[in-house]
Amino acid sequence: MSGMLYLCGTPIGNLSDFSPRGVEILQSVDFIAAEDTRHSLKLLQHFGISKPMVSYFEHNKRERGEQIIKRLLDGESAALITDAGMPAISDPGEDLVLLCHQNGIEVSPVPGPCAAIAALAASGLPTGRFCFEGFLTVNKKGRREHLQGLLKEQRTMIFYEAPHKLCATLSDMLQILGNRRIALAREMTKLHEEIVLTTLEEAEEKYRETPPKGEFVLILEGCGEVEESFETTPQERLAELIASGVSKKDAIRQVAEERKLPKREVYAWTIEE
Ligand code: SAM
């Protein structure tokens, strides 16, 4: 009979968030598959767990995935852990879980912290309907296309973001989606935890002046049921109005009002052109 793959959520900062069941499972399995074995060794040592580990990460997942599946089919049991949070959520795991299902191996979650859900719950934004957008690509064009595809999204949106990309992301969000509420959850469960509900305009200004530090989850308000949802980006709308004969000044005022954007920002696009 084949073994079982446990998906163990691990702390996203505070080690006390690791569940007693998580500890029990790591102690009981035959081996642990970890994203970064050196990083995970600290967690194991903290909880007095001594267990063989194999690495399983983005660049070895095909070959290593097959090896793990073979061991599970031979009757061993394993736990998959990543550097922080729930495996398979913007982390290695998705492919291994699918392989298990395809090979008739049972998968059992051992739920633990998930940065996306922790940030959403603490955001102050509607939690009834939400969607997870993960990381936006580093590529500017791809990032803007991704955001343009969210123009009509009514649900609260969750993004993961690295500090060095935060300013560019906030600026693109403001330009493409217009000013709206955003919660920034930084360094959750750690010493410098900070969760702020603000607007895109204020957040963009703040982090332009003070470079961001630490890990961030962004919780962005949806376009709202009562609000009009737009077919075009504000820049396209501006160009459309000017092309139809509306004066530049009136077009800027109209786009700023329609899209709830600061006039100086819309004005800046006319200079860029
Ligand atoms: N699988 C993980 C989970 O379920 O939470 C997420 C892994 S993903 C590679 C890492 C991203 O999660 C970071 O770039 C950041 O956006 C977010 N993150 C992780 N820990 C965080 C924390 N303590 N505070 C804020 N964001 C965090």
Image: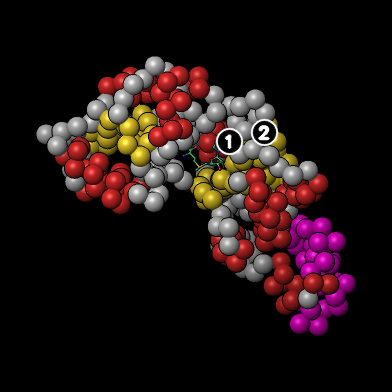
- Mark 1 is on which residue type? Ala
Q: In the image, is the residue at mark 2 within 8 Å of ligand 1 by its beta carbon?
A: no
Instruction: Say whether marks 2 and 1 touch (CB < 8 Å).
Output: yes
Q: What element carries label 1?
A: helix
Please say if 85 is above or below 167.
above
Residues rendered magenta in the picture:
241-270
Name the side, left or right, on which 171 lies relative to 13.
right
What colouring style does the render use? secondary structure
- The verdict on residue 106 being magenta is no
Q: What element carries label 2?
A: strand
Q: In the image, is the residue at mark 1 within 8 Å of ligand 1 by its beta carbon?
A: yes
Residue positioned 62% across, 40% down in the render:
216
Q: 254 and 1: which one is in front?
A: 1
Q: Residue 271 carries which label?
A: none
Q: What residue would you read off at disc 2?
A: 195
Cα–Cα span, label 2 and label 1: 8 Å
Q: Quadrant of residue 249?
A: bottom right
Q: Can residue 199 be seen in this view?
A: yes
Name the side, left or right, on which 261 lies relative to 74.
right
Q: What residue would you read off at disc 1?
A: 119
